[in-house]
Image (cartoon, grey):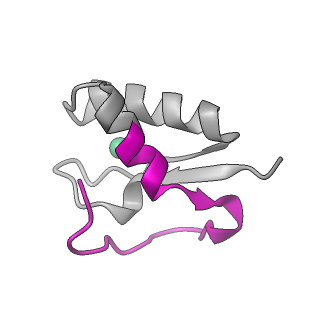
Amino acid sequence: MARMMADCRRFPSVSNCSLTIIGEEEEVVRAAAEHAASVHEHEDTTELREQIRATLEPEEAYVFGARAPETGAPA
Ligand SMILES: [Zn+2]
């Protein structure tokens, strides 16, 4: 099964978070939701997890080093 990636670098944040989470989809959705709650002060809800799931990329999209935030993307 292909692994998926949640990349905080894509989204503007107060802390300029650089975290990238890669794993199987369910692992990434869970870890990213817990991270969003603990670091980005989101509420860990079903809606948040669905939003995270919608932004996942295949792990092949990983880029080393810095990555510019995308404008207009959900924070
Ligand atoms: Zn983050």
Residue 63 magenta-highlighted: yes
Which of the four quarters of the rendered structure image does ligand 1 lie in?
Answer: top left
Dividing the picture into quadrants, the one containing residue 50 is top left
Q: Which residue is located at x 20 percent, y 71 percent?
A: 72
- 12 relative position to 20: left or right: left
- 27 relative position to 48: left or right: right
Residue 17 in percent (x, y) is at: 33, 50
Residue 54 in percent (x, y) is at: 44, 54
Q: Which residue is located at x 22 percent, y 47 percent?
A: 15
Nearest the camera: 47 or 13? Answer: 47
Residue 22 in percent (x, y) is at: 64, 46
Q: Number of callouts in the render?
A: 0
Q: Which residue is located at x 19 percent, y 30 percent?
A: 41
In the figure, 8 relative to 65: above or below? above
Residue 18 magenta-highlighted: no
Please provide the residue range marked out in magenta: 50-75
Q: Which residue is located at x 39 percent, y 60 percent?
A: 9
Residue 21 in percent (x, y) is at: 56, 44
In the figure, 21 relative to 38: above or below? below
